[in-house]
Amino acid sequence: MKHEERVRTCRTLAVLLLGVIVAGCGDASAPASPTVIGSTSNSWTGTLPNRTTGTRPVCQVPLPATAVCLNDLNGTPQAICQDGRYSCASDAGVCSAHGGVYCWRN
């Protein structure tokens, strides 16, 4: 079969490797070239955001839609711990090994 006649296929690799999601597209006979299409962080970068006061402080900025949370869980972060790590949990003991909750998802 001639190269021009080959059926072109696209494949998406939903591979989470070291926090990077990659995708590839190519013809069936050639390996895909990975391209970064997104990344998943496990902690807040930079200075912690502003928060409300009180017994359940709320983050004054949006948290990411998805993250690698404590215990290597992928999901929607519900809180930022005092050390900047994300937690996907919202029950008792959240961030207990990370200095406690800094702020909760708004």
Image (cartoon, rainbow, N blue to C red):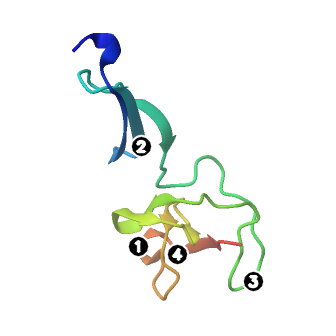
Residue 72 lies, in percent from the top left, at 35, 62
Report whether 45 appears left or right of 70.
Answer: right
The amino acid pointed to by label 3 is Gly
Q: Earlier in the sequence, mark 2 or mark 1?
A: 2
Quadrant showing the C terminus:
bottom right
Report whether 23 appears left or right of 6.
Answer: right
Quadrant showing the N terminus:
top left
Residues at marks 3 and 1 touching, judged by CB atoms closer than 8 Å: no
Q: Which mark is residue 54?
A: 3
The amino acid pointed to by label 1 is Ala
Residue at 26%, 11% in the rendered image: 2
- Can residue 5 be seen by looking at this rendering? yes
Viewer-nearest of labels 2 and 4? 2
Residues at marks 2 and 1 touching, judged by CB atoms closer than 8 Å: no
Q: Report, in whole angstroms, how far the alpha carbon at label 2 lies from the one at label 1.
A: 28 Å
- Can residue 34 be seen by looking at this rendering? no
Residue 43 lies, in percent from the top left, at 51, 55
Q: Report, in whole angstroms, how far the alpha carbon at label 4 lies from the one at label 1.
A: 7 Å
SS for tag 3? Answer: loop
Residue annotated with mark 2: 21
Residue annotated with mark 1: 97
Q: Residue 7, located in which quarter of the rendered image? A: top left
SS for tag 1? Answer: helix
Report whether 81 appears left or right of 1.
Answer: right
Viewer-nearest of labels 2 and 1? 2
Q: Which mark is residue 100?
A: 4
Residue in the foreground of this view, choosing between 86 and 36: 36
Residues at marks 4 and 3 touching, judged by CB atoms closer than 8 Å: no
